[in-house]
Amino acid sequence: MTVEQPAQPAHTAPPPRALPGGGQSRLHRLVAIVVDKPGVLNRVSSLMRARNFNIDSLAVSRTDRPGLSRMTISLHGDDIAVEQAAKQLYRLIDVLKVQDVTAEPTVEHELALIKLRVTDANRGEVLKVIELARGRVLDVATEAVIAEVSGSEAEVDAFIAIVRGFGVKELVRTGAVVMARGAGSIEEAVKR
Amino acid sequence: MTLTKRDRARRSHMPADGTEHAAAVERAQREMLHEGSSTSSVPTGERGARPRIGADVLCEALLRQGVDVMFSYPGGVILPLYDILGDYPQLRHVLVRHEQGGAHAADGYARATGKVGVCMGTSGPGATNLVTGIGTAMLDSIPMVAITGNVPSALIGKDAFQEIDINGITLPMTKHNYLVRDANELPRVIAEAFHIARSGRPGPVHVDITKDALQQETSAEHPSAEEVVAGLPGFRPTMDGNYKQLKLAAAEIAAAERPVILAGHGILHAGAEAELLAFAEKLNAPVAWTLLGIGALDERHPLAYGFMGMHGWKHVNRAIQSADLLFAIGMRFDDRVTGNVRTYAPYARIVHVDIDPAEIGKNVAVEVPIVGDAKRVLATLTPMVEAVSAEQRAPYLEQLAGWKRESEASSWHGSGAWRDGQLSADYVVERIGELTEHEGIYVGDVGQNQMWLARYAGFRHPNTHLSSGGLGTMGYAVPAAMGAALGVPDREVWAIVGDGGFQMTSQELMTLVQDEIPVKIALFDNKKLGMIRQWQEIIYAGNFHSAHLMGPDYLKLAEAYGIPSMKASTPAAVDEAIRFAQGVKGPALIWFEIAGEQNVFPMMPAGKGLSDLIEEWGTAE
């Protein structure tokens, strides 16, 4: 057993301690199963704000099980930071299960509605492009049409890029919902 | 009855005229004006003769939880509770002078006894006044249930008199919170609140109850403990450490030559003092503690190394900086403990044990994370580690002992006078410790007094050092001492408070008198905000803006409250003053006039590391 200070000579500074959460930031998808009661969404969003996590999108709905809701939270951060976000979510009494499905094979889907400016002159062209780009026309009016598109975030992005040139009057996106592929089920994994 | 045109016009302003909702709002508005709002027509004391209402359920639930005292202040919407409180003489109600004092008192009670503290206030300002105390409890993981009244449920959201969204306010600073609009939910909610407050990592829970719920007749039954647990599927704290992780920890410990055990508040929460002692003794490893970990180990024990961090002992920080293993348990690597994380314990691998998974990897990256209760983890881990004899560890321990002698010698102002000849604050703290034979409960405020207390009082028992560590709430000491004294009547309770903090909550002096609570107050008066002045001197180039503050004649103040008091301005007067306070049956106040420019050293400036301690400062005279 040595009495000396550890091996490094005094003049070489030891390497700095790594800070948690200094890694590469990327988009993460967290799926949370929460108790379906008033205020839970507020608790989740308040916590994310207070802990300095910036949510890209958040989609909430009921599940097939009475009393349970599901949230899909999309946020940017490195793996450690997002793990910290998940752990903080677990501290909420109403949060039953949190899964980071970023690294798993998933199905991911989002829906967007886009109101595009049209004139009598270009209406036909606009409708054609929407169709070609795998959108759907939901409403046609004299000076505008509403297109619907659904798919992965990238697919929705691509669609918007194609039709943007016609003039976007209004745009709404639901934010992504995801589900892991295969037989596993986060709902079934919730202990009740 | 026919309506005039004017009547019709006015009635049309009511929401959804003629509906049930409108009727409820109307009823609630009448209630708010105290028409027919008396809870019962029978006199108090005849509980059996009147119906059981929500307020009764609340009192029953509190009694079922073992509550014997609560700190509270009445107000409009919580009056239905006060209307029946006289029927429950087992529930001692302490009428504080400000709700913040009530929250701190509940906090002090909880820290001193380990039980859940209870405070209450009315809606609006009563509720917002509790907030600082709830935040203090949150940051220090103190089991507390804070109860507030709220306006009748039909008026919620209408900016009624004294209405504020207190649930929204306490949401980020509680472990959980509730709004109860139906008396039938009260038994479950109160039982859940106590269960959540005390289980796992403790913390405050806020329960907001509408006035109509307090008044509503109900026959709701109280749930069993099992039903409460079953009703909270999202709250299952992990108590036992993962066996694989414990094996890894044992391997780290076996490989370490310079281990340091970092003991935090979690040891006290879990009641793991005996397990910590056995663990440290088996390994012959030194134990350092955080501010809130004080009392985890008797300071006289040879392995008790000292208080760490920003104003910790130099030898302790030095040991951490040269350690090859930190075994951190029940602590959370607060910035006051680590300083700059980049330079923190640069040679050390870290085993981190905490009951809250979110604390692990939050502030520092660790090699071995273990989630679990401190007591259970230590009880399982100790038999798994190889014993290291004092002989094997001797060279390391001798080096540490040398460092300790060195740093204690350099920082001790043994004469009792600081270098300007005025009374030295650390001497006073030391004498209070001595003359109470280290058997008291010592409640610090925030700032220099807090650090002097942590360093010099000499602690021997858990839960005898109370301090607002996380939130750093000035004004904490006097009300918290009040709660501690009621919770633990057989220990002498001392509040160590600066003149700044004292002036924040001194209204509770009257509560001490009215409720005959024997708190001894050591008021450290340097006519400064001492820690502010210290930072300004060292970090802000001596720009002492707002550091000087005036105070009243504290003897006259104490006299006005009817509290025996004495002043001590020289080292020679200190012992007599302390003995005087000890001799008083009820509360007493000692006014210590201390040196105006004495600083707490060593000091780690914010943003710097544990190796960058400032040990003395040039020309403070």
Image (tube, grey):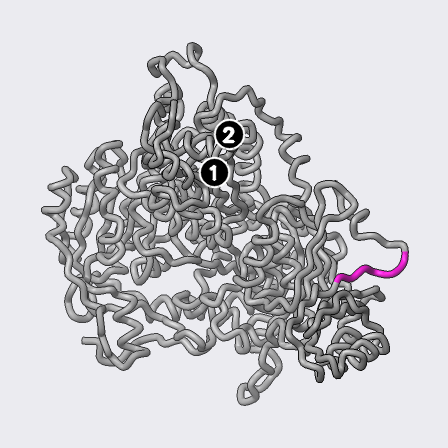
Q: Is residue A62 left or right of residue B115?
A: right
Q: Chief secondary structure of the magenta span?
A: strand
Residue B455: mark: none
Distance between the alpha carbons at the discs numbered 2 and 1: 9 Å
Q: Quadrant of residue B489?
A: top left
For the point 47% across and 30% down, the residue is B213
Q: Is residue B503 left or right of residue B14?
A: left
Residue B319 in the image, given as x and y percentages of width and height:
51, 69
Residue B293 in the image, given as x and y percentages of width and height:
47, 54
Quadrant in which the C terminus of chain B is drawn: bottom left
For the point 39% across and 35% down, the residue is B8
Residue A152 in the image, given as x and y percentages of width and height:
79, 70
**For the residue marked with disc 1, what is the amino acid?**
Val
For the point 24% across and 68% down, the residue is B598
Identify the residue under disc 1.
Answer: B116
User: Relative to the observer, which residue lies in front, B56 or B516?
Assistant: B56
Decide: is B530 above or below B279.
Answer: below
**For the residue marked with disc 2, what is the amino acid?**
Gln
Q: Which SS class for mark 1?
A: loop
User: Relative to the observer, which residue lies in front, B519 or A110?
Assistant: A110
Mark 1, chain letter?
Answer: B
Q: Which SS class for mark 2?
A: loop
Q: Are marks 2 and 1 in contact (CB under 8 Å)?
A: yes
User: Relative to the observer, which residue lies in front, B39 or B277?
Assistant: B39
Q: Quadrant of residue A144?
A: bottom right
Which stretch did the figure color magenta?
Answer: A177-182
Q: Is residue B534 visible?
A: yes
Identify the residue under disc 2.
Answer: B65
Q: Is residue B573 left or right of residue B446?
A: left
